[in-house]
């Protein structure tokens, strides 16, 4: 049995921009320390922690929830005047449901798909987060003045939609303190295709990387596959 040889061409990634762009962070939803110090929302106080599971059966976190009975408010919410207090929340008496709406354009969705999306949240206690009807994360207990973070994977990024979106959280009542502050941010490279044009179309300043991410010199007369100006080119000679 004879074996047929196949030529395997090396793959090079050619970047035609003249300089690397810095990463940019944009806040989709502010926390108290990233924006104006407060944020608008809708909220609903329940009577017992068991009411949360009943509200979940009614899908209170859905995008199309009937909000006619919800109260307009401003977060963060807290029982402690020295901790995140913008709106008083009697957390020793009532669990709470919160809905925050925001609008995304097609360009915003493009940034989300190529960027790093992070949910940032400080809580007390036992929060459960939902985005457009899909559960994101839950936590037990509280984290005092600290912030936890959740980095979105590719599956969670698909929960975003063009137009109206809603990020919801429920928190249980407890015997001690109680508060909630949360927000969303996206960190991305503004030079990515579809977001902005490169500084230069010249290949004189091109940089080449191998598949492990190491920069290599541009080999004269090399053979292989390059990616330049958004197109794949096979160099045979």
Image (spheres, rainbow, N blue to C red):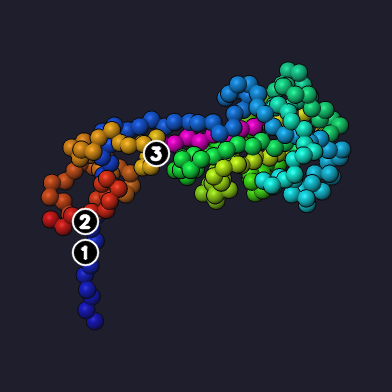
**Left-right relation of 87 to 33:** right
**Labels 1 & 2 near each other (Cβ < 8 A):** no
For the C terminus, which image quadrant? bottom left
Residue 131 in the image, given as x and y percentages of width and height: 63, 44
Residues shaded magenta:
181-189
Q: Nearer the viewer, mark 3 or mark 1?
A: 3
Q: Is residue 95 visible?
A: no
Task: Name the N-terminal-most of marks 3 and 2.
Answer: 3
Residue nearer the viewer, 57 or 196 = 196
Residue nearer the viewer, 175 or 49 = 49
**Element marked by disc 1:** loop
The disc label shown at residue 194, or none = none
The disc label shown at residue 234, or none = 2
> What residue would you read off at disc 1?
7
Task: Name the N-terminal-most of marks 3 and 1.
Answer: 1
Residue 19 occupies quadrant: top left
């Amino acid at each position: 049995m004879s074996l047929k040889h196949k030529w395997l061409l090396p793959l090079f990634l050619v970047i035609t921009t003249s300089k690397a762009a810095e990463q940019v962070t944009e806040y989709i939803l502010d926390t108290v320390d990233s924006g104006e110090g407060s944020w608008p929302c809708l909220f609903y106080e329940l009577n017992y922690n068991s009411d949360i599971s009943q509200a979940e059966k009614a899908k209170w976190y859905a995008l199309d929830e009937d909000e006619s009975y919800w109260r307009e408010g401003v977060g963060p919410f807290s029982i402690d005047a020295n901790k995140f207090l913008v709106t008083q929340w009697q957390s020793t008496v009532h669990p709470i449901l919160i809905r925050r709406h925001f609008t995304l354009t097609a360009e915003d969705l493009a940034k989300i798909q190529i960027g790093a999306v992070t949910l940032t949240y400080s809580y007390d206690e036992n929060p459960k987060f939902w985005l457009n009807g899909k559960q994101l994360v839950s936590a037990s207990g509280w984290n005092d003045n600290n912030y936890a973070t959740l980095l979105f994977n590719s599956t969670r990024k698909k929960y975003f939609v063009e137009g109206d979106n809603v990020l919801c959280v429920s928190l249980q009542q407890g015997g001690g303190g109680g508060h909630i502050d949360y927000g969303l941010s996206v960190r991305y490279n503004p030079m990515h295709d579809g977001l902005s044009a490169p500084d230069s179309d010249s290949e004189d300043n091109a940089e080449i990387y191998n598949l492990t991410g190491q920069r290599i010199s541009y080999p004269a007369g090399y053979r292989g596959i390059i990616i330049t100006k958004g197109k794949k080119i096979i160099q045979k000679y």
